[in-house]
Structure formats: structure tokens, C-alpha cells
Image (cartoon, rainbow, N blue to C red):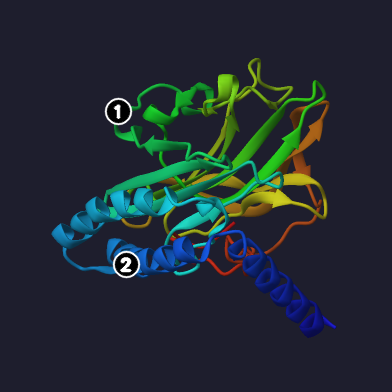
Amino acid sequence: MKQILVLCTALCLAWNAQAQRDQIAPVDLEQLETLEDTLGLLAYAIVNDSLEENRFGAVRVFIPKLVEALKHPHSFHYPFEQLQTVSIQYPQDSTFRIFTWQLYVDKDTYRYFGTIQMDTEELQLFPLRDRSDGFSSNLEQAEFTADEWYGALYYNIKEVEQVDGQKHYLLFGYDADSFFRKRKLVDVLTFPNGKPLFGKAVFVNPEEQTAKKRLVLEYSAAASIKLNYDPAHELILFDNLTTVGGSYGEGPVNIPDGTYQAYQLKAGQWEHIDKVFHTWLEEAPRPAPVLDGKRRGILGDGGQ
């Protein structure tokens, strides 16, 4: 039965991809396929080339090539399946899609790049500029525009309908951060006045006076943690972290203790649940890949 389900899912994805391509004129489709070949090679080099100058050079060429591709009519419906190291996430309403990718600079420095493409007749792009290096205030209380984005590689997106008819989108992301410490976060994307804004006070905890505008978990690079939306339980589910002394001189680090916390949607806000699944595990579980078996490759530790 499981194999049949996997086969049916694969067939549906293939059919949807073909249906999307059918909306693109043959001449544009041919040009997009040619551009995709180039973009695929560049995307691979950004992640895998051993020389810093080659990785940086690939990024510099990749960005204008991607813009060139997206300028083609109906490019929103082109899936770019060869870009295995670029995450492309669509919300349920498909009003936009968000591209993100990661550049390794050195063992303690990573840069993130991205853009939001709206599903409009004329190309509407919002380039995302990573400004996380200059960030010094409380990350969980900050708001960012596309020009001052806190860079991350997004591995999931959840559309949320609020009680007032408005929407917000939860962006689940990974930040490789540094050699000893990694981060996962849930950012909140809205479009006031038609422009993207990151951060909204929707995470409520009765033990805290102020609602958080995003969730951030920092943890040891030696650990793997879960942070994702669980559709079966309708919860944002994440590992409870405990602080221990590092084993390699890095100082105190956070690791999962085998229990989980969660946030549950109520009246348009996400209310904190201190402990779910009241079962203690001897060993913290290793989560499945962040894309849940979808076709796209992902960077980082691969946890949810």
C-alpha cells in the first residue's frame, strides 16, 4: 500500500509539472530549459566547488541568469527541477514562491540569497538581501523588509488564515550560522501594502509578557533537531533543548533532551504548549529530511 501511495504521489507531481509547463509558450519553454541547464551547473558550483573564488563567482553569475529566466512569460509555472541545491517553496494558495540558497564562506560564515516571485502577469520580484551580520537586537522581536532580511534556507512553508480574513505565512528555515552552533527558525511573512515583511507577533506564551515575532532555536552543530509543522497533530512541533557543556572547547551548547514543545493555532495566533507527547525517550529521535522526500535537495543538517 505504501508503494502504491508513493507511486500515485509521484504520478501526481509529474502530471502537475507537465500541466504547468503547458502554460508556457514553446519558444519560452525552450529558452527556459537552456537557461535551467546553466543555472543547474552554477547552483551546483555554489555549494560544491572547493575554491572560494569559484563559489563566489558562481553566485555572481547565477543571480542575473535567474532573473533573466524569470522574465519569460509564465515563468512562475516553470519548476526549475535541476536546481537541486536551491529551495523553492510555494504556499498553498500559490500566490508567490520563494527561492533561497546558501553560500559557504568559511567555517564560521555563511551567506544566504533569495528572492520572492509573485504570481503576476508582469514579473514582480522582491530580492532578499541577507543583513544578518549586522543584526544585534533581539531576533525574536525584530521585523525585517526584503532589503534587511535575516538570511535562511527555507525548507517548508505553511499558509495561515487569520480570523480577520488576513493571511500570514510561516517560513521554516535553517541557518548554518557557525562551526559549533546552528539555528532553525520559524519566520512570519506578510504582505502589507503588497510588499514582503518578515516578523509578526503571533507566537504567544503565557509565561512571557510579549508575543514573539518569530521562533529561533540555536543548537549544537553536533545535534539534529526537529522544527516543523506537523499536519497530523496540527502543531508547530519542535525539540525541547537543554544546555550542556561543549565537548570541543566551544562553551555551553543546546541539545535536544527527547521531549517536545509545540505551538497550536487558536484565533489567528499560535499558543505555546509546554510539553507534548508525554513520553520520555532514551535518545532524541533523528528526524526525516527537511523536504519530506520531495525532489529538492537541501543544505545544512537535513533535520526538520
In the rendered image, which quarter contains the N terminus? bottom right
Q: Disc 2 marks which amino acid?
A: Thr
The tag on residue 278 is none
Q: Residues within 10 Å of mark 2 (few under 14, many from 20)?
A: some
Say if residue 180 shows up in the picture: no
**Furthest residue toward top:** 209
Q: Nearer the viewer, residue 263 or 157?
A: 157
In the image, taking residue 57 as reference, residue 266 lies left or right, namely right
Q: Nearer the viewer, residue 142 or 88?
A: 88
Residue 272 falls in which quadrant of the image? Answer: top right
Q: Residue at image x 82%, y 55%?
A: 232
In the rendered image, the vertical position of residue 121 relative to residue 41, given as above or below: above
The tag on residue 38 is 2
In the image, taking residue 274 as reference, residue 52 lies left or right, namely left
Q: Residue at image x 46%, y 23%?
A: 138
Say if residue 290 shows up in the picture: yes
Residue 270, position as x, y percentages in the image: 74, 31
Can you tell which of label 1 and label 2 is closer to the viewer?
Answer: 2
Residues under labels 1 and 2: Cα distance? 33 Å
Residue 82, position as x, y percentages in the image: 45, 69
In the image, taking residue 22 as reference, residue 263 lies left or right, namely right
**Residue hosting label 1:** 134
